[in-house]
Amino acid sequence: MTDFSQSSEATPTAKPKSESLFKMDARTKKRNAAETRFKFYGIVAIGIGLLMLVVLVTNIVTAGTGAFQQSFLDLNVELKADKLDKKGNRNIEDIKKVSTFGYAPLIASALESEVEKLGIQSGLTPKEMGKILSKAAQAELRNFVIANPGKIGETVSFRFLVNSRVDGYMKGRVSRESIANDKGISVEQLDFVDQLRNAGVLYKAFNPDFIFGTDASDQRPEAAGIGVAMLGSLFMMFVVLALALPIGVAASIYLEEFAPQNRLTDIIEVNISNLAAVPSIVFGILGLAVFINYMHLPTSAPLVGGLVLTLMTLPTIIISTRASLKAVPPSIRDAALGVGASKMQAVFHHVLPLAAPGILTGTIIGLAQALGETAPLLLIGMVGFIASNAPDGVVAGFLSPNSAMPAQIYEWSKRADPAFYERAWGGIIILLIFLVTMNTIAVILRRRFERRW
Amino acid sequence: MAISWLLLILLALAVIGYFTGRSRALSSAGGNVRELHSLPSYYGYNVALTALVPALGLLMIWLLVQPMIVNSTVSGLIPDQALPEGADRGLAMSEVRRVSDGLDGAVAAGAISQAQASNADADIEELTQTLKDAGQVLTQDITQPILVAAQKYRSMTTTGSVAMQVVVLSLALLGAAFAYIRTHKEFRARNVVEQGVLALLLLAASIAILTTVGIVLSMVFETMNFFQLHSWKDFFFGGTWAPNFRGGSELSILPLLWGTLYISLIALLVAVPIGLFAAIYLSEYASGATRSVAKPLLEILAGIPTIVYGLFALLTVGPALVSMFGDGGMLGVGWMASSNAVLTAGLVMGIMLIPFVSSLSDDIINAVPQSMRDGSLGLGATHSETVRSVILPAALPGIVGAILLAASRAIGETMIVVMAAGAIAKFSGNPFEAMTTITTRIVSQLTGDTDFASPETLVAFALGLTLFIITLGLNIFALYIVRKYREQYE
């Protein structure tokens, strides 16, 4: 090698700047450093993007898993006949006359006897002790008695929800320092909670009511659930599926297979690509103006939400359906036409079935997008309203006011009590589980059934 | 319920039509399928479609037009002096509808008879009491003109729906009969059915146009109402946003536009460098394996619903920023008072937009012909020099298009700003302050108790229209740039 460099040095006309190509000059070093730097920037950019994803997911999981657990207190309540059914004839109308307020003494005395049995000395009055329980406990007891009037006079064991602050203490969200200015709970009550916890009657457990239950008023975060909102979302998705799939597929078939090259086709194409980029809130304004103000469809109804989301999802479905129709090779159409099928028969009997997996994939992705959309739902009144009752029947499911999952999450995030934030994150976990499932199904469908020609 | 029954009857008619049409065609050919012009099922489809489609179309048009006619007739019945002070016709009409619903409900519950409900000389106080006892919601006492109008409304609606059912059903029967009579072995059923199906396909495709028309019309009408109540000069050129539901509001779009643009700018400052560098790395440097992992992972960020980003901004990023820049924060500067701030919303929106910029730019960089890379590398340029002086200039129009699309997303984004940007409309350059945006104000003006006759509510439609025009303009411009660029290399 040295020979070579020497010989080149020997030529007088072409004198290289450096002695050897293997020895880098300052400029090459600079250029190489710039190269490394540039590559590094790229890695950093991707790193930041992925880091954000990790932070987001970790945040959701850590903040939201708490919502699936709730603190409960086991109590044996004696359903005293003299309090609940004064006439003694077990008439359901008379029993219903006792308000939830009338059940408070029963719970208080049950708690008192439990405390005596466990030998806990707290120095709290029975009323203060009772405050660690949720206000939902009385309603739960009342509902039980009305459903089972025969149990009056017996002692029944219950698992009651505790107050959201006690629950927060059990989960580490509330501490003795943080409640200094809180009128809802005192340090003595927390000591009492500790004693109950050590005795094993107050404990954390999985809370199915969060997933399947109804929303509660803003005073009782511990009793709030997302079940009804989930039903609302489900009914909306039915509407979207029933309308957006047929209309979207029909529109794509027309545009891809039959549309002549003319002004009308151009206008339709431009419209579809523009609608795909219109901000979702504009669809909300459309829904409010057309479906509610003009057509007088019921406010907050999943039907209206479904209609708005249909208009929003249509462009997505049309674009993906056209792509999968385009992917079917022309030879299929030619073969069908060659054996005497009409153009319509070629499309409906041969092209469409072959494109079906792609269409299905696009539809599922469109549905997932619609499921997570919130902004248009705010304008048609699916927020600011407590979804406390499940709809009774299919027609009511479409027409009676309801919430939807993202709207319910937004609603919780607006409420003052921080205990609702945990619910909001928990709701997001459920929402994301749905979205991940739908997208996974879409990917699996694409992998398994999509044909490569 | 009436309409669902009507639909069921129509469907049943179509099914019956299918089978009768099919069997009539077969019998006309003496049971020999070969003598028919088309397959037997086409004769069936012909009868079913002729029965169903015109009837359904008429039903839809009727449902749209009837409220219009009823409303205009009934609102003409209310004399001007009967309107409550400060209220307008729209408000009176909603009162009329409420009373009419109340009467319907009371009749359905059996509290009053049909004759009592339509008795124009009824004692108003007694009627109000009866309605309230029957559990109907009435906001105020019924006045005589309102009651008369409500009764007219009821009778028109009832007659209208009866007429609709009769007309729609007879149209369906007529259609079925017409198609049935035409059914004969010589009849070219397949051609007719295919024409009909093609028309339906075209109709489905035109729904996109209808939606756009619906969006524009619904906003244009209300915007025109708004400009009758409020001066357009104040809306476009005023300097203050101060809605006041007692009147005398100042409703100018400029402070909102400023907030929107400022937040979008911060979002783009986050998203464009990260997205662009990620795209360059993925398309020019990354190995196939890295690319197939990193690209879908980044795209997950685009698939996360905006409510999640909103909550992330509100509960995580905002408090984290306050703990850094707030009073007694880590940096000890005390610049940030609350977690609602331009910076919070901008940062989170920027994260959301990273995949928009990176995916589009990635496609565009990949579309640059390989020969250009080879030429540059062959001349001795390093990889990064090739990217900077050959590929990026070639891809620049497309990248600008991608950035414009991301900007239009940022301007129209709602949930993040609703939850994290705040509600104060002002011109300020301080990113640590709360500011408000067009979309936030649309949400706040249109939720809760709204009165569609006050400029404070109607301004939302003017804001929506402006937003629609801005994003539409940006999109068309971006698509134009992208398309023009693509033509260069094809």
Image (cartoon, rainbow, N blue to C red):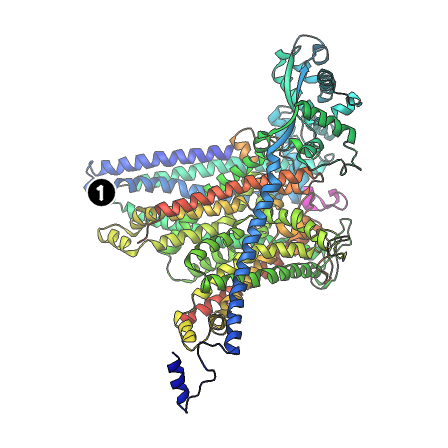
Tell me where residue B74 appears, x and y as whole percent: 63, 42
Residue that extends furthest to the front in the rendered view of this protein: A2
The residue wearing badge 1 is B36
The one nearer the camera, B353 or B190, is B353
Which residue is rendered at x = 75% and y = 59% of the image? B240
Tell me where residue A379 appears, x and y as whole percent: 62, 46
The one nearer the camera, A102 or B38, is A102
Tell me where residue A127 appears, x and y as whole percent: 78, 22
**Classed neighbour count for the residue bearing mark 1: other residues with Cα under 10 Å, few (<14), some (14–19), many (≥20):** many
Q: Is residue A398 above or below residue A57?
A: above
Q: Looking at numbered disc 1 in the image, what kind of residue is underneath it?
A: Leu
Inspect the magenta stretch and tell me whether residue B86 lies in it. yes
Which residue is rendered at x = 44% and y = 88% of the image? A15
Q: Is residue A151 above or below residue B29?
A: above
A411 sits to left or right of B487: right
Chain to which the residue tagged by mark 1 belongs: B
Which residue is rendered at x = 61% and y = 36% of the image? A67
B294 sits to left or right of A221: left
Residue A289 shows in this picture:
no
Q: Is residue A175 above or below residue B86?
A: above
Inspect the magenta stretch and tell me whether residue B361 lies in it. no
Residue B222 shows in this picture:
yes
Q: Quadrant of the N terminus of chain A?
A: bottom left
Residue that extends furthest to the bottom in the rendered view of this protein: A12
Q: Quadrant of the C terminus of chain A?
A: bottom left
A339 sits to left or right of A224: left
Task: Tell me the magenta residue range.
Answer: B79-92
Tell me where residue A12 appears, x and y as whole percent: 41, 91
The one nearer the camera, B147 or B323, is B323
Label 1 sits on a secondary structure element that is: loop
